[in-house]
Image: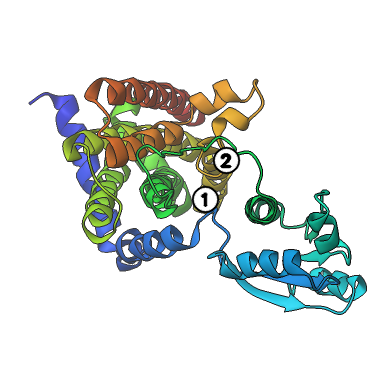
Amino acid sequence: MSGALVRVIAMALKELAVVLRDRRVMTTLVASPVIQLILFGLATTLEVKNVSLGLVNRDTGIASEQFLAAVGAARNVGEVIVYPNEAALGVAIEQREVLGGMILPPDLSARVARGEEGQIGLLLDGRRVNAAQIVTTYISEITATTGMALRPGPAAPDLVVRNWYNPNLDYSWFTLPGMIAVITTVLVLSVSVQAIAREREFGTYDQLMALPMRHWEILTGKMVPAFLVGLFNGSFYVAMVALLSDVPFLGSYLLIVLAIAAFSLAVSAIGLAISSVAANQQQAFLGGFLVIVPMILLSGYASPIDGMPAWLQPIAATDPLSHLLAITHGVFLKDMPAAMIAGHIWPMLAVALVALLLGHTLLRGRSS
């Protein structure tokens, strides 16, 4: 065994001992992420359910009856609250009692009976942009279906929809595999950003630099605990989601673990680069937070990468989290082949190499 390898192993064992001896850290690294995976996996959904809507109904004909019956039967509408006028409805929306309100004019049924186009007003709370857009789609579909039932005409072409990989568009099939990547990111960064900043805060940085070790050996040894934390927790979360949820697991467990290893390596290297310039652990945590937020926003978890500006999409392509998200969703839902997984792994390894070189340069600069 070469001397460099011996020194790296010794540094790694020392760092592992520091992490494992702290019970608070163990609680943070094991119990807390499991709770987060369960809660966030259930809470983070783009579907709007049990929405409360207001109603101002000035029509008593068949058109309003059928429309309101269809709204009441919709599985995403929880409650329809009747208001006497538009002013009362406006106050309810302003006070967030309802997400929006429907206004049925007095001539709605009469216009439909004459074969004319009827109009229904829909007021929505624009402060809740995502929910408002989704509810607009719900009500538009109900309106179109009711209109076709009231005024049957020439048969329109049927639209046959098939959703590959997620037939019922179940959001948990998207969020739970995605949370594996997101929580692993938070865990690995929270451990790696402390590695060198802790030495400075405790006053042992000079002793660390006086050891008969090269800078790259120090970085490699200090990266091991964060890497192992990410590998263990990520692999554990994959097994937990596959075994305890209804999300199908169609791919290879070994391949997704390999991807998690490459991802943990990249995020650990990013955390070490931050730790190399941080004067204390507080600065290191702030630096980690500044990195975590852009990584999540650019990953495609919160919003599609295709919808981002053209100049921002190449930056998002360098985000390791975006590649792990593609792998987790692909392995869980469609048995992503090894060649495609390799196409996402090498960018993560490239990020790890660049971040390690940056951390090495920064460490040498601070110690000179």
Is 157 situated above or below 309?
Answer: below
Residue drawn at x 58%, y 43% as measured from the top left = 290
Mark 2, secondary structure of its residue: loop
Q: Quadrant of residue 322?
A: top left
Residue 222 appears anywhere in the view: no
Picture coordinates of residue 259 (x, y %)? 28, 33
Q: Quadrant of the N terminus?
A: top left
Mark 1, secondary structure of its residue: helix
Q: Horizontal placement of 144 versus 170: left or right?
A: right
Q: Amino acid at mark 2?
A: Ser
Query: Which of the marked residues, 1 or 2, is nearer the chain's N terminus?
Result: 1
Residue closer to the observer: 278 or 302 = 302
Task: Say how many tags the image has.
Answer: 2
Picture coordinates of residue 45 (x, y %)? 51, 56
Residue drawn at x 88%, y 67% as measured from the top left = 106
Q: Residue furthest right?
A: 87
- Between label 1 and label 2, give the one nearer the viewer: 2
- Density class for disc 2 (Cα within 10 Å; few <14, some 14-19, many ≥20) is few
User: According to the image, label 2 marks what residue?
Assistant: 303
Q: Residue furthest left?
A: 1
Residue closer to the observer: 360 or 162 = 162
Q: Horizontal placement of 132 versus 336: left or right?
A: right
Is 278 situated above or below 145?
Answer: above
Q: Amino acid at mark 1?
A: Phe
Residue 308 appears anywhere in the view: yes
Is 218 situated above or below 112?
Answer: above
Picture coordinates of residue 151 (x, y %)? 70, 51
Picture coordinates of residue 34 (x, y %)? 33, 62
Residue drawn at x 82%, y 65% as measured from the top left = 104
Q: Point out which mark residue 285 bears.
A: 1
